[in-house]
Image (tube, helix red, strand yellow):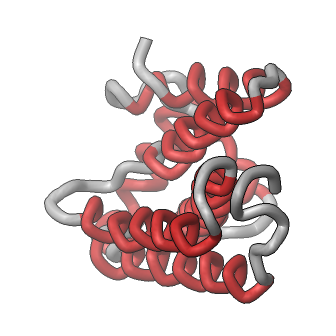
Amino acid sequence: EPGPAGARTPPAVWALYCALAVTATLLHAGFVDTARWATIRAEWSSAILAGQGPSPDQYRPLTHWVAAILHRAGLGWDLAYQVIRGVATAAAAVLCHRFLAAWFPLAACVAGTLWLLAFIPFTHLHYYFQPADPLNLVGVLLQGRRVELEAATLLAAKTVIATENVMP
């Protein structure tokens, strides 16, 4: 890691981020991904994968493609989306920390990343199932990372995520 935080990030910090990502995913599962969505989610995903889903999600198929791959691997639709949310939230925490590490000391990087992780459950209030949100967050943070690195290598990954998860 370049910058003031350098390579001094202890493994316990990464473990904390992963634990909080799992916690945010479980909160989402409990507050949003309730049993009442099980049938709707499967139908919704199938419709989007068939090119007949509701707008704007029809224009954000990446999450549904990944969920379909996990579903074909044996996971239920609910678990597939929870795995995507958990992995994307953990990736967002790592990307946020690494972005902040270019300019700030370790304590500020941890504080900023913890703020991001603490804020995520509040985004679950008063909304319905939003499957593209976790990958959208990763896309935004990848773009920040690309700018920080001033390299085009991550631009391709960001472009794929952005083009498959945003409205035209």
Q: Eyeballing the image, is 98 above or below 53?
A: below
In the rendered image, residue 126, in percent from the top left (x then y), is placed at 14, 60
Q: How many marks?
A: 0
Q: Residue at x 46, y 22 (%)?
A: 59
Which of the 4 image quadrants contains residue 88? Answer: bottom right
Please indicate, yes or no, whether residue 80 appears anywhere in the rendered image.
Answer: no
The single residue placed furthest to the left in the displayed view is: 126
Q: Residue at x 71, y 64 (%)?
A: 5
Q: Residue at x 68, y 34 (%)?
A: 148
The single residue placed furthest to the top in the displayed view is: 168
Quarter of the image with the C terminus is: top left
Which of the 4 image quadrants contains residue 141? Answer: top right
Please indicate, yes or no, whether residue 55 appears anywhere in the rendered image.
Answer: yes
In the rendered image, residue 110, in percent from the top left (x then y), is placed at 56, 72
Q: Left or right: 102 with respect to 96?
A: right
In the rendered image, residue 149, in percent from the top left (x then y), is placed at 76, 33
The single residue placed furthest to the bottom in the displayed view is: 12
Closer-to-camera residue (19/152)? 152
Closer-to-camera residue (161/5)? 5
Q: Eyeballing the image, is 57 above or below 127?
A: above
Q: Eyeballing the image, is 135 above or below 75?
A: above
Q: Eyeballing the image, is 66 above or below 54?
A: below
Q: Which residue is drawn at 71% across and 77% down?
A: 14
Q: Left or right: 136 with respect to 90?
A: left
Closer-to-camera residue (114/140)? 114
Q: Left or right: 14 with respect to 139?
A: right
Quarter of the image with the N terminus is: bottom right
In the rendered image, residue 55, in percent from the top left (x then y), is placed at 33, 25
